[in-house]
Image: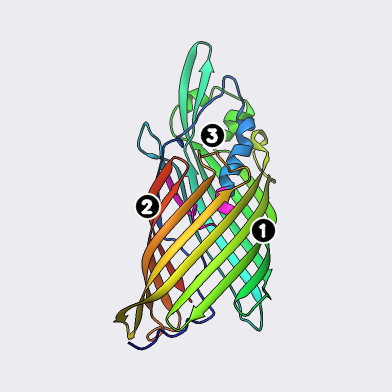
């Protein structure tokens, strides 16, 4: 068998597009019952931003989560992220990254009027975008130190699905947010990364160590009852091994892929869903399409097993290289 040709410098990024959301069964992460009788929704504004912290940090392990409510078996937390990044070239070591994410959180509030209490199921939909710019400093031919500046924007929209007639009888700011309120947030911060690319004719090893710190704050037309701030701090380790299977597709070697990643959550998002770390192990296949396409040169599908504190599940990730 001919040796596997060395992959080009332009490569997949660890948080490259994961297009199919995985399923994560969480023993301790369920929809919350937040009691409006003893606490205001404003007290939970930082919690909303803490959930947003999962989405603004480029992170393979939490890029696609679906956490079930143990009572209804419906997802009470759903997150999906599409992102990627790469350096322009070795002669122009400018690094660019970007990610866009959507999440939905379905908390249930308990409101009371006298002795009567009603559950108010709500839905909070969040859209975030993160962009980063960095610079590669080569320590060796294979090892790069990369500082990155990141900026993030996010928006949360709330809507009621039931008990509208009950909510309309309330006039405080808390319920104003529940009924069609919005939360706007921006984030500033950055990351530092060590990136090791070990390329040989018959295999390739990618290893990345990254620490990200982005501070989120509400701004603008955010409903007055839900202004707050949070920190998105995450440490990530990512490793990937690629080698030929001995088979050929599209006139190019078909490679198998082994992956491992570990993310430790150190900011406001730690433990808010019942876990402070997530790990994945993955196995997949990679097609080299460069023989027939100059736009998409490689495509990869990886099945991953995800696990952490009291949680586990599976996901399917799809990625392309341009």
Quarter of the image where one finds residue 179: top right
Q: Nearer the viewer, mark 1 or mark 2?
A: 2
Rounded to the nearest angstrom, the CA distance separating label 3 from label 2 is 35 Å
Quarter of the image where one finds residue 255: bottom left
Per the image, the residue denoted by label 1 is 151
The residue located at (49%, 23%) in the rendering is: 166
Tell me if I can see residue 15 in this picture: no
Per the image, the residue denoted by label 3 is 179
Among all residues in the image, which is located at the extreme top? 115
**Membership of 59 in magenta stretch:** yes
Of residues 45 and 157, the one nearer the viewer is 45
- Where residue 271 appears, as percent x and y from the top left, is 55, 39
Mark 1 or mark 3, earlier in chain: 1
Per the image, the residue denoted by label 2 is 314
Q: Which stretch did the figure color magenta?
A: 54-66
Element at label 3 = loop
Rounded to the nearest angstrom, the CA distance separating label 1 from label 2 is 30 Å
Q: Residues within 10 Å of mark 2 (few under 14, many from 20)?
A: some
Above or below, 216 relative to 129: above
């Amino acid at each position: 068998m001919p040796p596997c040709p060395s992959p080009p410098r332009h490569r997949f990024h660890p948080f490259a597009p994961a297009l199919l959301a995985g399923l994560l069964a969480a023993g301790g992460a369920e929809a919350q019952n937040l009691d409006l009788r003893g606490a205001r929704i404003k007290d939970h504004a930082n919690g909303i931003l803490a959930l947003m912290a999962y989405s603004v940090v480029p992170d393979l392990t939490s890029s696609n989560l679906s956490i079930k409510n143990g009572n209804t078996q419906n997802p009470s937390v759903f997150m999906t992220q599409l992102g990627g990044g790469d350096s322009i070239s070795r002669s122009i070591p400018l690094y660019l990254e970007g990610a866009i994410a959507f999440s939905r959180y379905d908390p249930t509030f308990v409101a009371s009027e006298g002795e009567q209490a009603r559950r108010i199921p709500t839905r909070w939909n969040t859209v975030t975008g993160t962009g980063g710019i960095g610079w590669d400093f080569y320590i060796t031919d294979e090892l790069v130190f990369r500082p990155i500046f990141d900026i993030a924007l996010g928006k949360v929209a709330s809507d009621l699905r039931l008990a509208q007639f009950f909510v309309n009888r309330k006039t405080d700011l808390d319920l104003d947010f529940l009924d069609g309120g919005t939360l706007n947030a921006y984030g500033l911060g950055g990351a530092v990364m060590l990136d090791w690319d070990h390329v040989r004719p018959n295999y390739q090893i990618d290893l990345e160590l990254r620490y990200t710190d982005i501070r989120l704050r509400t701004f603008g037309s955010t409903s007055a009852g839900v202004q707050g701030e949070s920190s998105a701090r995450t440490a990530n380790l990512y490793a990937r091994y690629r080698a030929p299977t001995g088979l050929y597709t599209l006139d190019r070697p078909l490679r198998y892929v082994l992956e491992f990643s570990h993310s430790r959550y150190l900011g406001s998002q730690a433990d808010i869903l019942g876990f402070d770390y997530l790990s994945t192990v993955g196995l997949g296949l990679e097609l080299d399409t460069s023989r027939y396409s100059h736009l998409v040169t490689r495509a990869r599908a990886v099945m991953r097993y995800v696990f952490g504190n009291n949680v586990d599940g599976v996901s399917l990730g799809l990625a392309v290289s341009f």
